[in-house]
């Protein structure tokens, strides 16, 4: 039986972004492994802090899987060691037939074919939008490409970036689109009447997400159109978040801008499902999961006309130029002032999300594996 080893190192207790991708990919692969005649193994590495204290236990979300392996080297150190081409990690990994690195790196195992997921190329295309740690991804990815047999990515847009910036042959790249973390509209656990009506953004707060232009658009609508809406920002503070909070503090309407940190999936769903409009004005995305989440939960979407976002949103959202806050403001006003437009976007969104599922992601990933096994 074919033994497939998937790297779960980036899956933490409170997953978002890449962590959600790994969580759902592993879960779906585990469910189909027997009918598809492969055996799923997982590997993880300790953080530097845990390694120094001798803590090699698996992250809680990985513990339910029986075939679990620990590579007893901290992530940061193994990335450095991988630069030495004679070093191999095979003896720790139980000799898999294929190893899948899920976060811009794959171990140089001598006797396994190797697949690597590249989620986006922000660190190459827009290095001013990433921190010093992420900037190291460029050297890491280029080194791994020397022994990688297959690239998996999440959108056609990112595939084209990989071809252009990393000179990878198109036939070596497989696209496996992602899906919403919500399978259906959940029952609302708590009414948000005390906050309604509101405009919503769910995102890590960092420069690439274009939150400041959203605040500018909100300020303009409050001043010129006297809208009654609040602006709610849900997400953890990311790299260089300080200017975003300065923009909030300097807003004449700062009392009507709310920031909420990491929330449970159910609580985020409550906010999605009761928002008048979801705005996702990011400058660049490898995929853009929050778009599908909002659509699944019946929220009309406004998003950027750049990178992968039109590919994900299709005709079920209003596209705007992320560099133009006034265009963003106009789109928001259209949605909140036109109930028919809002209902049309909701209906199109619910139809759009039917094209995406995590089972489909897993099966497309398996197809990619089979192309090189």
Image (cartoon, rainbow, N blue to C red):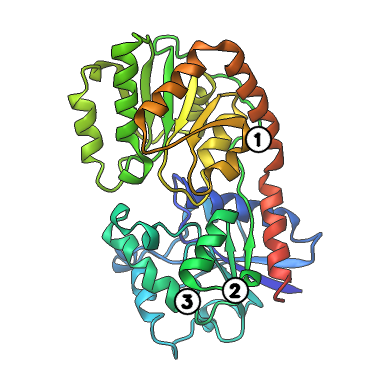
Q: Position of residue 206 (x, y in %)?
A: 32, 43
Q: Say whether residue 120 is left or right of residue 112.
A: left
> In this view, which residue lies farthest toward the bottom?
86
Is disc 1 placed on a helix, strand or loop? loop
Residue 165 is labelled as none
* Residue sitting at x 61%, y 13%: 340
- Which residue lies under the disc numbered 1? 183
Relative depth, front residue between 126 and 257: 126
Dot 2, how many residues are within 10 Å of its Cα: few (below 14), some (14-19), or many (20+)? few
Residue occupied by mark 2: 169
Q: Which mark is residue 144?
A: 3
Neighbour tally class for label 1: few under 14, some 14-19, many 20 plus, Cα within 10 Å: some
Label 3 SS: helix
Residue 337 x %, y %: 49, 11
Q: Are marks 1 and 3 in contact (CB under 8 Å)?
A: no
Tell me the distance, in whole angstroms, between the alpha carbons under discs 3 and 2: 15 Å
Is label 1 or label 2 in front?
A: 2
Q: Quadrant of residue 142?
A: bottom left
The answer to whether residue 95 is seen in the rendering is yes
Q: Quadrant of the C terminus?
A: bottom right
Q: Nearer the viewer, mark 3 or mark 2?
A: 2
């Amino acid at each position: 039986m074919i033994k497939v080893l998937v790297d779960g190192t980036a899956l933490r207790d409170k997953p978002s972004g890449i962590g959600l991708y790994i969580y759902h990919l592993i879960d779906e692969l585990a469910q189909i492994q027997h009918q598809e005649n492969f055996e799923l193994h997982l590997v993880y590495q300790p953080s530097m802090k845990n390694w120094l204290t001798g803590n090699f236990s698996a992250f809680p979300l990985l513990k339910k899987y029986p075939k679990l392996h620990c590579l007893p080297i901290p992530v940061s150190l193994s990335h450095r060691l991988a630069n030495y081409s004679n070093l191999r990690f095979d003896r720790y990994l139980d000799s898999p037939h294929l190893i899948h690195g899920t976060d811009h790196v794959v171990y140089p195992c001598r006797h396994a074919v190797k697949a690597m997921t590249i989620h986006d190329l922000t660190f190459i295309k827009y290095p001013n939008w990433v921190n010093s740690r992420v900037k190291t991804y460029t050297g890491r990815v280029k080194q791994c490409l020397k022994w990688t047999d297959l690239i998996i990515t999440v959108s056609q847009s990112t595939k084209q970036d990989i071809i252009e910036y990393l000179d990878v042959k198109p036939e070596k790249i497989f696209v496996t689109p992602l899906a919403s973390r919500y399978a259906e509209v959940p029952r609302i656990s708590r009414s948000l009447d005390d906050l309604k009506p509101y405009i919503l953004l769910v995102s890590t707060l960092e420069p690439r997400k274009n939150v400041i232009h959203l605040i500018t658009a909100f300020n303009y609508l409050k001043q010129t159109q006297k809208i009654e809406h609040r602006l709610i920002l849900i997400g953890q503070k990311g790299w260089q978040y300080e200017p975003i909070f300065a923009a909030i503090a300097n807003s004449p309407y700062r009392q009507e801008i709310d920031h909420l940190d990491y929330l449970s999936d159910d609580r985020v769903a409550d906010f999605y499902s009761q928002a008048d409009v979801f705005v996702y004005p990011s400058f660049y995305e490898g995929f853009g999961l929050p778009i599908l989440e909002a659509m699944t939960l019946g929220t009309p979407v406004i998003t950027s006309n750049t990178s992968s976002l039109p590919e994900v949103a299709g005709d079920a959202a209003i596209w705007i130029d992320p560099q133009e806050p006034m265009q963003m403001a106009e789109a928001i006003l259209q949605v909140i002032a036109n109930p028919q437009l809002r209902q049309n976007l909701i209906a199109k969104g619910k139809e759009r999300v039917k094209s995406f599922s995590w089972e489909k992601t897993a099966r497309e990933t398996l197809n990619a594996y089979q192309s090189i096994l």
